Image: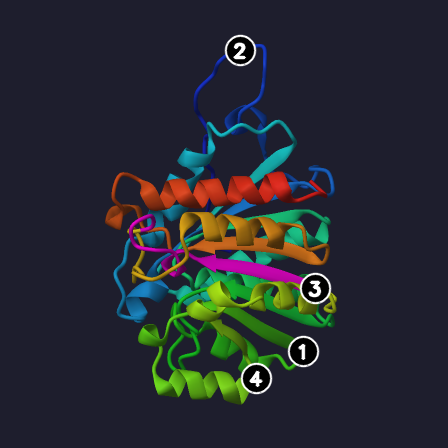
Amino acid sequence: MKHIEHHTFTGRVDDPEVRERMHQVIGQWSGEAPAGVPVFIGFRSDEGVRRNKGRAGAFDGPVKVRQKLASLPYTEPVYDYGSVVGDEDLEASQEALGECVGEVLARNQFPLIIGGGHETLYGHYLGIRKAYPDKRVAVVNFDAHFDLRNERPSSGTMFHQILSEDRNIDYHVLGIQPSGNTKTLFDTADEFGVHYALMDDVRRTDVYQRTLSRLEAYDVVFGTLCMDSVQQSVAPGTSMPAQNGYTAEEIHGMVAQLAKLSNLVSFDISEVAPALDVDDRTSSLAASLFHSFMIERETF
């Protein structure tokens, strides 16, 4: 098992007698935490980004996003597991994350996973399968890229790995950019039967509403958001910033709708790279998206 690093939450206090900010109500996770609560799990890794020849920097994402979450208003029970500290052995790091996610799911709690490069998603998936080995599963991804490369595991291969080894899972991805994916990747998506929507289609059609309706038919759904799907002006701190990505308003609305899906069991936000950020825009947006998700999730 990889090292688990714990985070100390600190932030603004308006009245010491009134606990109404995240840092005042969040507790350290243990096996005694009640069912139904959200549990943050960090994945400190950007080894997958390095292997994918991207711009590294996401290793510190879980730390910075937690700092931005700390002073946000929140009064319900919430827990923090800590962060898996990854290293060059990406595969073992992902296995360790899968153990953490599976442990939380086994207690009927809701993992909120903070990446890390988008290789975070494969560890997230491993935890899903530990908890739900035989269920019909869907993964929904807000992303500019398919991440369907057929090569050494990295931040660009996760969905090829999953779809190659698991015949009981469907992949839905929204926000694909034609400028960020080769013909080979589009062909691979077609071969795997991927349900994808280009960025322009998300904006101009009701494809997201139709996707949400389709997701209701699965036993289990888990979600992932790659911050490189968001416009560079509001999310510059990513490995591959997007010029025509989601606006902050668009992605907040989509995440809020996803949060209401009754069969959704976990959610991650990945590719926050503080070293590449400007004025903490990307980490602040990621924290805001988690906060919006928690407010909209009706079962917390």
Q: Earlier in the sequence, mark 2 or mark 4?
A: 2
Q: Nearer the viewer, mark 4 or mark 3?
A: 4
Q: Nearer the viewer, mark 2 or mark 4?
A: 4
Against 33, residue 158 (above or below) is below
Label at residue 193: 4
> SS class of the residue under badge 4?
loop
Q: Earlier in the sequence, mark 1 or mark 4?
A: 1
Magenta stretch holds residue 221: yes
Q: Bin the neighbour count of mark 2 within 10 Å (Cα to Cα): few under 14, some 14-19, many 20 and up.
A: few
CA gap between label 1 and label 2 equals 50 Å
Label at residue 220: 3
Q: Earlier in the sequence, mark 3 or mark 2?
A: 2
Residue tagged 2: 16
Q: Earlier in the sequence, mark 4 or mark 3?
A: 4
Residue tagged 1: 168
Task: Tell me the kind of residue under disc 3.
Answer: Val
- The quadrant in which residue 32 appears is top right
Task: Tell me the kind of residue under disc 1.
Answer: Asn
Q: Bin the neighbour count of mark 3 within 10 Å (Cα to Cα): few under 14, some 14-19, many 20 and up.
A: many
CA gap between label 1 and label 4 equals 12 Å
Magenta stretch holds residue 193: no
Label at residue 237: none
The x, y position of residue 142, in whole percent, is: 48, 62
Callouts 3 and 1 close, C-beta under 8 Å: no
Against 26, residue 249 (above or below) is below
> SS class of the residue under badge 1?
loop
CA gap between label 3 and label 2 equals 41 Å
Q: Nearer the viewer, mark 1 or mark 4?
A: 4
Magenta stretch bounds: 220-235
Task: Tell me the kind of residue under disc 2.
Answer: Pro
